[in-house]
Amino acid sequence: MKKVLLSSAAMTLMAGAAMAACPAVTVSDPMGVAAGAFPQQYELAEFQGLADCTLEMSENPDIAALNGRIRGNPEMPALADRLPSEPLVVAPYDMIGSYGGTFNALSNATEAGTSDFMSVRHVNLVRYADDLTTIVPNVAKSWSWNDDYTQLTFVLRAGHKWSDGQPFGAEDVAFWYENLALDPKVIESPKDYVLAGGEPMKVEVIDPLTVRFTMPSPKPGFLAHFANHYAQGFQPKHFLGQYHPAINPDADTLAQSLGFEGGYDLIKAYYGSSDWMDTPTPMLAHPDKVANLPLDAAPTLESHIVISETTEGRQFVANPYYYMVDTAGHQLPYINEMDEIFVGESEVRLLKLVNGEVDYKAQALQIDYVPLLMENQEKAGFTVDLKPDITMPTFAFNVTSEDLEKRKVFGDLKFRQAMSVAMNRDEINEVAMFGLGTPQQYVGFSPTPGFVTPEWEQHYAQFDPEMAKSLLDEIGVVDVDGDGMRELPNGDPLILNLQVATQGISIKIVELVGQSWRDVGVNNTVKEVTSDEYRSSQSSNQLDVTLWEKSVPLAVVLGNAEIFIPPYDNYFNMRTAMLWGEYVDSNGASGVEPPAYAKQMMEDVKAFQATPVGTPESDALGLKLVEAMTGNLLFIGTVKEQKPIYHSNALKNFPEFKTASYAYYRTYPYRPSQWFFDE
């Protein structure tokens, strides 16, 4: 029997959660750290009546067979040798689950729209609890800050192993940071979240289970980043390191023997060239070479590991070395297998949902789908919940358009003001959102923090087509040929190309906005495209208008300042001013120099991240960011909405989500490894 003391840091229990082998517990104080509070020391919750409570560990009876389907994995040792000495103990929401079953997932394409499903198996150093305010342990057993938030130390779990059975530890965290996140041959430019004040951190391996981040300036929001972001703060050094020239001097030779040009090419085959965790594995990216490679996919700490991948979809099996157990000592996850299919057409995705062929879905579910889903949920055995969204449908004009005449017009604040007041947000709310939304302007943060004064939520958000027409007249965007549609000041036609990826925004909303713009004389066309097509056009600066859902919680900005730095987000989300971003990334060597207010925002967000949240200094900096972003209408908001969450009725221990939001990494706060299927 493997003894586990449930009062240890391995615990992640919620008050009132079901218990099985041990007595009921009372949580005397919330475990973890309140988002925005960032105390110096992580405090353990106290669990009463558990001093002598032990668990006898048990495993999935199918786990050996599942391990046998992971090509390259060794024969599986006993459970006691697969679990950490302090596994993470997870209290099921309703009941101890049963093993087995296949989870059916639906994604848009090979990489697009996979985040929703990825969150089901996702792990990181910490996570948000399901109250969406408390940070609790996950891969890390505990953490501590120094007094000024310039040092964050994580303690990991003894005996934790990768999915191939190799030890996991502090070296894997340091390898991720130094050899992947900061290596320009892997990721071209470091992400904002791995920097503090724009400068790299120092990562020290204190001992095999302790790793410390030392920052050049305070960054108290760094912890929150690991709680809500898809990028995992660790990678398998024992595996990827053998192909990294900085780790292994023979890396290139080894990679060449496996059919690749060099070590970095093989790292890209397994890891990709960004921090996105769902890049194609060698099974899809290099099907002609994968048989010669030691593994089909890099080892993982996630609940399931991919064993098959094609352009049609992927298949996963339970990780035999997963580090979580339930309160009866059963190793998680309960679900044996996961099947993910890729469907690019929104109509086909909707049909599969209506037919009950999917077990869970939230990403790319627009409010347009709700009536049809509601109509069929009882018959097809699924449930649809409507929950508030953190983001809202948002539009941005390309102020660095390749068309210099359009660039001149889009860059004029009066044009952006006109296009904002031309929108009929009340109509959008009633027609597209069933009156459940809240019309407002984009302010960056969501929910709106207390430091944002009320007028900014309604800044140029009124419906005033006459003001819109007057502003357009002022800047010379007038109807020259008498056809009712306005031309550019030089007489060229002005037709906005509105490309819509339904993963990111409702096409009905775009059509309503497009009609409002035509009503004030600005012609446009609406065309549905795939997410990959949209992102490619956005990244190559080819779009007149970018349109997607946007806004993030305060805690996200404290850890990741991307939404205030050109081009104002990452590849997977909504961006604009791509040439400003190129200028920033190249230190002025190429691109277009941003205006003074955009440069000032970059400095202000660095100061904001370094200032303790809730202080007058922090509030003043936060308001200054909103005044610059919203005052210049770089992004134009519409209506804060509610969105559907879909799940099969056969899926048990599935809780009621608080939001339908990507902001906290979708399902990650809701402990999906304890979901299971009834018989």
Image (spheres, rainbow, N blue to C red):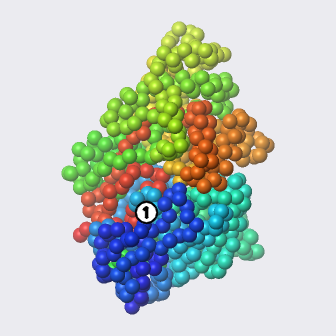
**Picture quadrant of residue 64:** bottom left
Frontmost residue, 360 versus 123: 123
In this figure, which residue is indicated by the disc labeled 1? Answer: 129
Left or right: where does residue 161 sit relative to residue 646? Answer: right
Frontmost residue, 355 versus 570: 570
**Residue reaching furthest bottom?**
1
Frontmost residue, 311 versus 40: 40
Specify the amino acid type for callout 1: Ala
Numbered disc 1: secondary structure: loop
**Picture quadrant of residue 679:** bottom left
- Relative to 208, does residue 401 appear above or below in the rendering? above
Q: Residue at x 78, y 42 (%)?
A: 588
- Relative to 116, does residue 372 appear above or below in the rendering? above
| Circle 1 residues within 10 Å: few <14, some 14–19, many ≥20 | many
Q: Position of residue 544 (x, y in %)?
A: 58, 31
Q: Position of residue 175 (x, y in %)?
A: 66, 70
Frontmost residue, 648 versus 310: 648
Left or right: where does residue 620 sit relative to residue 43? Answer: right
Q: Position of residue 26 (x, y in %)?
A: 34, 73
- Relative to 544, does residue 660 appear above or below in the rendering? below
Q: Is residue 427 visible to the viewer in this orientation of the structure?
A: yes
**Residue reaching furthest left?**
379
